[in-house]
Image (cartoon, rainbow, N blue to C red):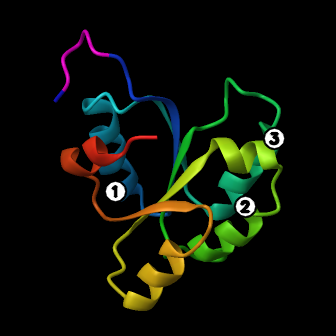
């Protein structure tokens, strides 16, 4: 764990997951390890997409990193990625996507890993080792 004198790796990250317990655990891991100063939590792909659209021109609110769950109702992680592609280039360029999923399906892993906006596939829950390996 970093000391209080260290700075955060990121200003803002967006955590997209419909599971409140996973969100709580992952948010604690992110904040405890000083990975990000701010963690924005959205419980659905729809609310996350709405947030990104509403804050498109607001650099102070935009996340630099998005942790995305795959298995969510209504719009799943893959649906989010399809809609993410339609957002402005500024959003797509500045917000890197890391899939954070409990899926061990080779199809899911391959499909997510080959998406042009996904920079990494990580299994839940986040841990200190995963966070230390993330550098952009």
Up/down of 20 relative to 114, above or below: above
Q: Looking at the picture, tell me which residue is in the foreground, 74 or 70.
A: 70
Magenta residue check for 3: yes
| Disc 1 from disc 2: Cα separation | 25 Å
Provide the secondary structure element on which disc 2 rests: helix
Q: Nearer the viewer, mark 3 or mark 2?
A: 2
Which type of secondary structure does the marked residue at label 1 adopt?
Answer: helix
Say which residue label 1 marks.
Answer: 21
- Quick one: label 3, few (<14), some, or many (20+) residues within 10 Å? few
Write down the region rendered in magenta.
2-6
Q: Determine which residue is flagged by label 3.
A: 54
Which residue has dot 2 on it?
A: 84
Helix, strand or loop status at disc 3: helix
Q: Give the number of the mark in front: 1 or 3.
A: 3
The numbered mark, 3 or 2, whose residue comes first in the sequence reads 3
Q: Which mark is residue 60?
A: none
């Amino acid at each position: 764990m970093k000391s209080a004198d260290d700075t955060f790796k990121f200003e803002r990250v967006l955590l997209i997951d419909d599971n409140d317990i996973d969100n709580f655990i992952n948010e604690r891991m992110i904040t405890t390890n000083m990975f990000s100063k701010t963690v924005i939590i959205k419980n659905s792909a729809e609310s996350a997409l709405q947030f990104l659209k509403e804050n498109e021109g607001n650099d102070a609110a935009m996340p630099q990193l998005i942790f995305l769950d795959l298995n969510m109702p209504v719009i799943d992680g893959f649906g989010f990625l399809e809609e993410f592609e339609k957002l402005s280039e500024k959003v797509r360029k500045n917000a890197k996507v890391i899939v954070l999923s409990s899926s061990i399906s080779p199809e899911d892993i391959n499909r997510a890993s080959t998406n042009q906006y996904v920079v990494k596939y990580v299994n839940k829950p986040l841990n200190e080792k995963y966070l230390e390996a993330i550098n952009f």
